[in-house]
Amino acid sequence: MRPDKIELVCPAGSLPALKTAIDNGADCVYMGFRDDTNARNFTGLNFSFDNAKEGVRYAHAKGKKVLLALNTYPQADGWQRWTKAIDNAAELGMDAVILADPGLMQYAVKTHPGLRLHLSVQGSATNYEAINFYHEMFGIQRAVVPRVLALAQVEQLMAGTQVEIELFGFGGLCVMVEGRCALSSYATGDSPNTRGVCSPPKAVRWQETPKGLESRLNGILIDRYEAGENAGYPTLCKGRFDVEGETYYAIEEPTSLNTLELLPELIRMGIAAIKIEGRQRSPAYVEQVTKVWRQAIDSCLRNTGMFAVKPAWMADLGKVSEGQQQTLGAYYRPWK
Amino acid sequence: MKLALGPILYYWDRDTMLGFYEEISDAPVDIIYLGETVCSRRHLLRLQDYLDMAERLVAAGKEVVISTQTLIESENDVKTLRKIADNGNFKVEANDMGAVRLLANKVPFVAGSTLNVYNPQTLDLLAGLGATRWVIPVEMSQEALAAVLRERQSKSETEVFAYGRLPLAFSARCFTARHYNLQKDDCQFKCLDYEDGLTLKTREGQPFLNLNGIQTQSALVYNLIGELDTLQSTGADVVRISPQAHHTGEILHLFRECMEQRLVPAQAMSQVGTLMPAASCNGYWHGKPGLDFILDNQLTAAENPAAVPNAL
């Protein structure tokens, strides 16, 4: 049951961002509540119940969908916070909830059998056996696949499952398999799985030194910038480190994923949806990225064979990319 | 509590691997996990080699568990997974939900730490599918574990990673190959040159992480030898030691001595300190950043080289 269209799923870190996404052509938006039940648990971000209600009303009035990310792993001492979030999602009429934890999926199925479930990228499902596990056990209808597979591997995966596949198309690039990275808690105590954060702002310190501007995470030197170098947020896998006397971006450069040129291939493969990363980004980012991707998808659907990436699109996306750099990531196998 | 030896996380040559397990067959360890869990390109030992080795270790009185690869990407990976699930003889450690699907309600299995069991509901669910043991997430604290065990309904054994460089992250990218500007598909098996991984330091020389192919580990060695009493009181049934290139047998021996109370924690800590490739950390167990080292009051820095980075 492959879908005959490809949905554009855009980030909504706030009500203004949600409206911006809908107004600029998103088919779906995804959001989280204001706590550690979602993987963008940042101060000043996300939705209260009332905000979410207004967001759902706004989107539904325009025939668009709202997905709720509940994609951290419930901690034993806070289980009710996660189940309450599921209850709230059902009450709000969310079009789907995006989950990673099997225990929580079981709760959702038992308590709200009509609620549509998506498997979050935090569920780390990189093969069809894993995806089918969640489908058979909990009836998940869509899986968001980690940013680690080559396109040919995604196609192989799709041959083994009927579950819809959503891929990341643009935005911040996790180099590690999502849901299987504890680097952040190793350095700071908080991780995406447990607290919904990576390299949390409260652990960040900037310091001017005679050697240059230094960024630290819980005291650990992540990078040091010479005069004239662009300083980026110290996400710990994107710093410069020393390996055998050589200093370089040992894990990954500060760069954004951009798969615009793969669009015809993604459509041919029957990908159900393309996800834009960036709930922590501004409404201006959401506007820019949504607009470009809407145009590109429409252009590609009109005539897939003739599709060409417009330089203006790339320029617009380049402006909002991390470090002004873009990559195809793992979809392009040599990246690995 | 039982003592377990985790799978070898590094890539050693065939003779080294075979010699390692020959030595281990005499070591005071109850459970041995075997198999390639990191990278499908590591092929000097095949599944059949591991199964043959498993037979020998069982004959030596060990419980053997075959561990599955953590990141399953290709159809070939899935095929190997199926062969392991269908091995018909040994219990399997499932390190991916794909493995759980193949084992559920058929073969008893160990729920590996990358299955991300953080709450009693998920633990009970996996136990219901046949998990007879679970390995806690590396980042789980003593307090969080106690909360899970307090509320669970099922009765599976609890295993804690208690010694070794922590497997913190998995990627599609190979960081060892990247260090040589090689692509993963043409990695020239550089991991063979790094028997304990490749240390990544900050630009001011602090050992931070340890590159092991597609796996990123802690540079420091997670070391709970001073915490065996809290492991026991929290409810751990099995304590896991992760193999390192040298002294693994001696480390197992020290853990055993300590578990049997023939050695006090301060002594054990002091002795293990001379056998480690890097300094200790234990922050996760105390609910702190993993790289922290919390000094228990019964261990003092003066008599514990393992607790003092510069002493190593």
Image (tube, grey):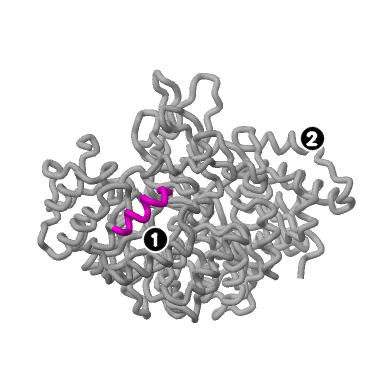
Q: From which residue to which does the magenta span run?
A: B11-22
Q: CA distance from mark 1 to mark 2?
A: 45 Å
Q: Position of residue A120 (x, y in %)?
A: 58, 61
Could you say where residue A281 lies in the image, as x and y percent from the top left? 60, 44
Q: Residue at x 63, y 63 (%)?
A: A143
**Disc 1 element:** loop
* Amino acid beneath label 1: Pro
Say which of marks 1 and 2 sits in front.
Answer: 1
* Percent position of residue A159, x then y: 71, 65
State whether residue A18 appears in this view: no
State the residue in front, A71 or A4: A4
Q: What chain does badge 2 belong to?
A: A
Dominant secondary structure, magenta: helix
Q: Residues within 10 Å of mark 1 (few under 14, many from 20)?
A: many
Quadrant of the image containing the C terminus of chain B: top left
> What residue type is disc 2 on?
Ala
Q: Horizontal placement of B196 versus A11: left or right?
A: left
Q: Residue at x 68, y 49 (%)?
A: A169
**Circles 1 and 2 in contact, beta carbons < 8 Å:** no
Q: Could you tell me which residue is drawn at 62 percent across and 53 percent down?
A: A149
Up/down of A83 relative to A230, above or below: below
List the residue tagged with mark 1.
B137
**Is residue B13 found inside the magenta-colored segment of the image?**
yes
Question: Is label 2 in a helix, a strand or a loop?
Answer: helix
Query: What label sits on residue A312 in the rendered view?
Result: 2
**Is A258 contained in the magenta span?**
no
- Horizontal relation, residue B270 to residue A295: left or right: left
Q: Are discs 1 and 2 both within one chain?
A: no
Query: At which x and y percent is residue B47?
Result: 48, 63
Mark 2 Cα-neighbour bin, 10 Å: few <14, some 14–19, many ≥20: few
